[in-house]
């Protein structure tokens, strides 16, 4: 079984530790997961959008990339144009690390 972690969550919540869209390090990601986030959701919780809070390209400037419940894991009822909404989840599938 392959488990894919949410890169977007790491960009949203690991800013300054793990990196940003402008670069980072694998040891920073491990440090963020173990010592700050405690867990990372699966990529189905928070899809990759290739933006972080320091992004200045394209649609990245029109969204909030701060670390929040909705920017960690969310579910949406349907498309916003059809009257749908998204809600952050408190409980979600995730992984942790014991050491690195």
Image (spheres, rainbow, N blue to C red):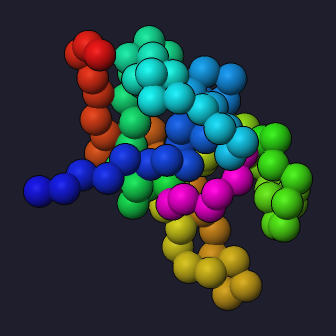
User: Does 84 appear above or below 67?
Assistant: below
Residue 28 x, y percent position in the rendering:
51, 22
Residue beneath the point at 11% across and 56% down: 1
Of 84 and 67, the residue lying toward us: 67
Q: Residue at x 73, y 85 (%)?
A: 81
> Which image quadrant is residue 24 in?
top right
Q: What residue range appears in magenta?
A: 47-52
Relative image position of residue 45 (x, y in whole percent): 43, 55
Left or right of 61, for residue 74: left
Can you tell which quarter of the image residue 21 is in? top right
User: Could you tell whether 98 is left or right of 32 in the image?
Assistant: left
User: Looking at the image, is 1 positioned above or below residue 82?
Assistant: above
Q: Position of residue 87 (x, y in %)?
A: 57, 55
Q: Is residue 100 magenta?
A: no
The reply, left or right, for residue 24 in relation to residue 53 is: left
In the rendered image of this protein, does residue 8 appear above or below residue 36?
below
């Amino acid at each position: 079984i392959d488990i894919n972690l949410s890169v977007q969550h790491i960009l949203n919540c690991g800013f300054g530790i793990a990196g940003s869209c402008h670069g980072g390090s694998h040891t920073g990601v491990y440090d963020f997961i173990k010592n700050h986030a405690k867990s990372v959701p699966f990529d189905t919780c928070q899809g990759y959008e290739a933006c972080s809070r320091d992004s200045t390209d394209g649609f990245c400037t029109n969204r909030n990339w701060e670390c929040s419940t909705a920017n960690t894991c969310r579910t949406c009822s349907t498309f916003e144009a059809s009257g749908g909404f998204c809600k952050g989840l408190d409980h979600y599938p995730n992984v942790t690390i014991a050491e690195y």
